[in-house]
Image (cartoon, rainbow, N blue to C red):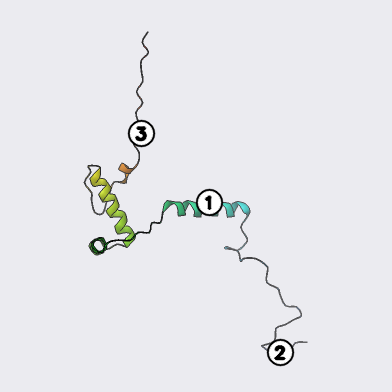
Amino acid sequence: MRDPCDHYTIDLIGGTRAKPGRKPLGERAMTPAERKRRSRELRRNRLQELSVTVELSRDAQKALDKMIEWWGVSKKEAINRAMLIACQSQTGRTGTLFEFDAEFLLPQPVKKRSRKKAE
């Protein structure tokens, strides 16, 4: 019998056991198909952004800080913009600061020439 005034002792009779395993993300456990769909989506999102670790010279760090100040963006966004602008300038296109044309990075379709057979 349990004492109603005792709030410290755990009820050994009639207590509920916690279910084993991890708690579900929603109201119920996911089906295997839902888990796989979620893992594929997370993997796809991870692969879209690649991580690169570099050491910058002091001059490059100062330039990056100026770009962050001018544009009012994060380091990641400033580096992304600077790389795209540099690539555009190398390909003969003029770089813009806030709107860039990323389509030039995609490979252009190659037109196949048809050869006429000599008869």
Q: Is residue 58 above or below residue 104?
A: below
Q: What residue would you read off at disc 3?
A: 109
Q: Quadrant of residue 103?
A: top left
Three-letter code for the amino acid on which mark 2 is drawn: Pro
Numbered disc 2: secondary structure = loop
How far across and down, in percent of the image, does residue 59 sit? Answer: 23, 62
Q: Earlier in the sequence, mark 1 or mark 3?
A: 1
Residue type beneath disc 3: Pro
Residue 70 picture location, percent across and down: 22, 62
Asked if residue 60 is positioned above or below residue 86 in the image, the reply reads: below
**Residue 44 relative to residue 88: left or right:** right
Residue at point 46%, 54% (across, down): 46
Q: From the image, tell me which residue sits under label 1.
A: 40
Mark 3 residue element: loop
Of all residues, the one furthest to the bottom in this rendering is 5
Using the numbered discs, state the Cα–Cα distance from disc 1 to disc 2 in whole angstroms: 52 Å
Q: Please, what secondary structure does the residue beneath circle 1 have?
A: helix
Q: Which residue is mark 2?
A: 4
- Looking at the image, is mark 2 or mark 3 earlier in the sequence? 2
Residue drawn at 23 percent across, 49 percent down:
95
The disc labelled 1 sits on which kind of residue?
Arg
Per the model, the C-alpha gap separating discs 1 and 3 is 29 Å
Please report whichever mark, 1 or 2, sits nearer to the chain's N-terminal start. Answer: 2
91 w.r.t. 48: above or below: above
| Picture residue at 75% right of the left edge, 78% below the top | 14
Q: CA distance from mark 2 to mark 3?
A: 79 Å
Quarter of the rendering occupied by the C terminus = top left
**Residue 24 position within the rendered picture, expressed as x and y whole percent measured from the top left:** 60, 64
